[in-house]
Amino acid sequence: MNLRDLRYLVAVADHRHFGRAAEACFVSQPTLSTQIKKLEGFLGVQLVERNHKQVMLTPVGSAIAERARQIINQADDLVQYAKAAADPLGGDLRLGFIPTSGPYLLPHLMPALGTQLPRLRPLLYEDQTARLIERLQRGQLDAGLMAVPVDVAGFDHVEVFAEPFVVALPPGHPLAVQERIALQDLAREKVLLLEEGHCLRDQALDICNRVGVREDEEFRATSMETLRQMVSAGVGITLLPALAAEVYRAFDAQGRLELRPFSDEPPVRRMALYWRRSAAREQTLRAVAEVIAGLSAVKPA
């Protein structure tokens, strides 16, 4: 038994298909299948159920695959630890971002990383929170920038900024005459929100529930850009994080979007950089977190 065979088993567990698992491992399907059979022979148990329609792991196969994943992560962390010891602030670093933050933060972050950590090579991934967590647990990412809280065991994190929400209104909306909007002003409004799976939806719902704001249940957007377009078309209002709002303000030459800050203490979402507690590159990740926290774009106005 070796790490290569364990990687094959984990790939089968992830893809539930020998062809796709073999492609992910850069080997032929017969090679992968043969090595899985050899692993079964070595361990003395059946790991995979094979039929013409699907590939499934046996109960013991699923349990062994999860243990194999932990072993692979530890082995990869060992390699990363050695590389980090040679050059802690250099090399590849796999960073994940949620879709409601990455496109608006990265134009500020990438130049700053290039200046402050020039030997670092960020590899960027964008996905919803649940899938970023899964990729972190599987060792496919080194860290993920996500909204607090992420209630998952085995993670460390450092908060990097708090981002206020602003209200996005169509032109001519009665609230647009106000320079600032109190949360209670939204009590009679219907708010457009993102679809299920986006943490921003949950955060906006939490804000709305404080004063009984209703969600427009006939519409759920797949992206922030869709939300912007629907508000511009007069369909409703929404809540946007400040970074995204600034981008939309800069490119809204035709004045189709009215953006208003909240009065008093605005509702905020707190963002943090998360990584596995066993990660070998904690020093590097904390350095990246410092760069994010130091960006002028995330500083309070």
Image: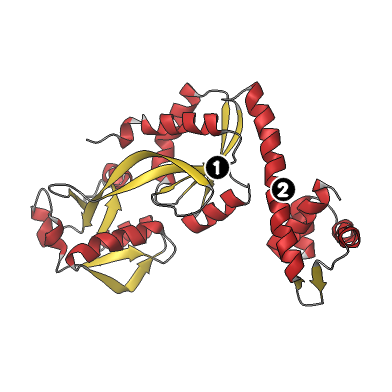
Classify residue 227 by image quadrant.
Answer: bottom left
x, y percentage for residue 24? 74, 53
Which residue occupies the foreground of this view, 210 or 260?
A: 210
Residue at image position (54%, 48%) is 154
Say left or right for 292 vs 193.
right
- Rounded to the nearest angstrom, the CA distance separating label 1 from label 2 is 15 Å
Residue at image position (72%, 48%) is 71
Three-letter residue code for mark 2: Ile
Residue 172 makes an appearance in the image: no
x, y percentage for residue 46? 84, 68
Q: Is residue 149 above or below residue 33?
A: above
Three-letter residue code for mark 1: Arg
Q: Which residue is mark 1?
A: 277
Residue contact between numbered discs 1 and 2, judged by CB atoms under 8 Å: no
Label disc, if present, on residue 71 of the rendered structure? 2
Say left or right for 147 vs 59.
left
Residue at image position (73%, 59%) is 65
Which residue occupies the foreground of this view, 99 or 79?
A: 79
Q: Is residue 281 above or below residue 232?
A: above
* Element assignment for label 2: helix
